């Protein structure tokens, strides 16, 4: 349910592989793991979310790679506890157990 998806801005210039592998906007464009296409990815955000632009960027990366995902934008909603309380049960209800 939303996120920054790139932690470099929090690292004050520090470089390390852990930063790369914890920043999906960096590693997803080149990831060759076939399991990526088997994941059930949901990007839940709102247009008032401070990370809205990061969600759009990750959505674009997934689209370019042809990775199925659900880009769920709740318009005109404050991205805070009330919307999370709405989103979380909805997302959980879509899980199918085999």
Image (cartoon, rainbow, N blue to C red):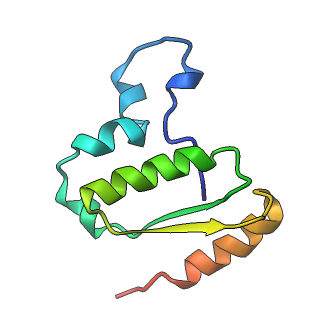
**Count of labels in the image:** 0
Say which residue appears at 74% left-offset and 54% top-offset: 48
**Where is residue 10, by image quadrant?**
top right
Q: Position of residue 91 (x, y in %)?
A: 57, 76
Whether residue 13 sits left or right of residue 67 in the image: it is: right
Q: Position of residue 64 (x, y in %)?
A: 29, 55
Q: Position of residue 68 (x, y in %)?
A: 33, 69
Furthest residue to the top?
Answer: 13
**Where is residue 25, by image quadrant?**
top left
Rendered position, 75 above or below 95 = above
Rendered position, 89 above or below 41 = below
Q: Nearer the viewer, residue 64 or 11?
A: 64
Q: Quadrant of the C terminus?
A: bottom left
Q: Position of residue 46 (x, y in %)?
A: 68, 60
Say which residue appears at 76% left-offset and 67% top-offset: 83
Q: Quadrant of the N terminus?
A: bottom right
Say which residue appears at 63% left-offset and 80% top-offset: 90
Rendered position, 96 above or below 29 = below
Whether residue 16 sits left or right of residue 78 in the image: it is: left
Whether residue 96 sits left or right of residue 47 in the image: it is: left
């Amino acid at each position: 349910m939303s996120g920054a998806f790139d932690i470099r801005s929090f690292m004050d210039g520090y470089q390390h592989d852990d930063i790369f592998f914890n920043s999906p906007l960096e590693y997803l464009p080149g990831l060759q793991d076939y399991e990526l296409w088997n994941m059930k990815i949901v990007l839940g955000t709102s247009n008032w979310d401070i990370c809205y632009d990061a969600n759009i960027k990750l959505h674009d990366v997934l689209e370019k790679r042809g990775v199925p995902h659900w880009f769920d934008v709740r318009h005109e909603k404050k991205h805070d506890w009330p919307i999370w309380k709405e989103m979380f049960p909805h997302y959980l209800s879509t899980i199918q157990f085999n």
